Image (tube, grey):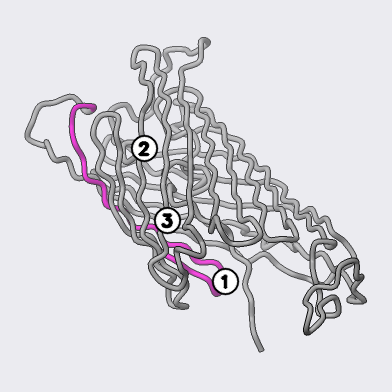
Amino acid sequence: GLNAFAQDHMYSQFFNSPLYLNPALTGQFEGDLRMNLIYRNQFTSVPGSFNYLTASVDLNIPKFGGGVGLMVTRSSEGTAYLTTTNISGLYSYSIGSQDFVLSFGLQAGVGNRVIDWSKLVFGDQIDPQTGYIPGSVSAAGLAQFNNKFYFDSGAGINMVAGEFDIGGAFQHVNQPNESFSGAPARLPMRFNGHVSYRWDLNQYDNNYEEDKSFIIPSVVFYKQSGAQSYSIGFQYKRANINAGLWYRGGGINGGPSAIVVSFIFDLFINREGGEKLRMGVSHDVPSSGLNYSNTSGTTEASVGYVTILPSRTDAEKKFEGARRCYDFY
């Protein structure tokens, strides 16, 4: 028989949606309040939209080196407008010293799936010669429901040691039942791991951090049931510009692969006020398995904003001066 596995979407700009990548990255930034928004339009020319959106807001709580956050993810897939929405709360806590910082994250929320059965076309609505029969009604038995709610959970860990940042996360730990029919259909657990290295191109120059140049190679690996993929590439980071080049492979199952180009711009930086506005764009060009002329590739856009709250106190950071994950993107 033929087996099919559902799988979560993955962002090419994984570093611009940190809470989606790993709950342990919640609150891991310079400032008090962070907001991120990322949108992915996959296979633009393929009939039936494949659109994904993640919005998040999190607070940095210095006294325990972590934070709390809220994240909303929504996807719309296919001509039947299968939409999935997930709203979750996140929490992270860190331990460590000046030499390393180890962060732990938890995530819990509610998921919802909705499908429009009227948009589906079945075999008895198709004439072998003329195609779809307008106004026809299928005799196929539809599932009992078109709306399903479920509890969802996740956990992650991240460590920064020297010039390395390494982490991993599990999503759908409870493997929720997302079936429309009543027969069990468990959402498979998803694992993703990531590792980055920061190479200072001006390590012998006594420059400020913002005046230096860095090459940051990274590897990100995803696995969910029988589907898996990986991204390998690097970023060039200097001042307010960050450019990346990546290759994404389809894993052992030979899924589609792509070349990804990304550009990140810090449009506004107010260091005294602790503000930063960042915008990112990326484009995936299929390199095997899919034809670019038929799909028009995949495009992502992201925006992030970090600020210091007016009510901020002068609380001492738990790991003042230590390297943190936000130094890698």
Given this view, does label 3 or label 1 mark the residue nearer the observer?
3
Q: Is residue 28 above or below residue 267?
A: below
Left or right, 232 with reference to 250:
left
Stretch in magenta:
210-229
Helix, strand or loop status at disc 1: loop
* Measured Cα–Cα span from mark 2 to mark 3: 15 Å
Q: Does the magenta stretch mainly form a helix, a strand or a loop? A: strand
- Which label was assigned to residue 264? 2
Mark drawn on residue 284: 3
Q: Please name the amino acid that badge 1 sits on.
A: Ser
Label 3 Cα neighbours within 10 Å, binned few <14 / some 14-19 / many ≥20: many
Q: Image quarter for residue 146? A: bottom right
Q: Position of residue 111 (x, y in %)?
A: 72, 51
Quarter of the image with the C terminus is top left
Task: Identify the secondary structure beneath mark 3.
Answer: strand
Task: Tell me, yes or no, whether the two marked residues, 2 and 1, touch with CB atoms within 8 Å.
Answer: no
The residue at the point 25 percent across, 43 percent down is 236
- Alpha-carbon neighbours of circle 1 within 10 Å: few (<14), some, or many (≥20)? some
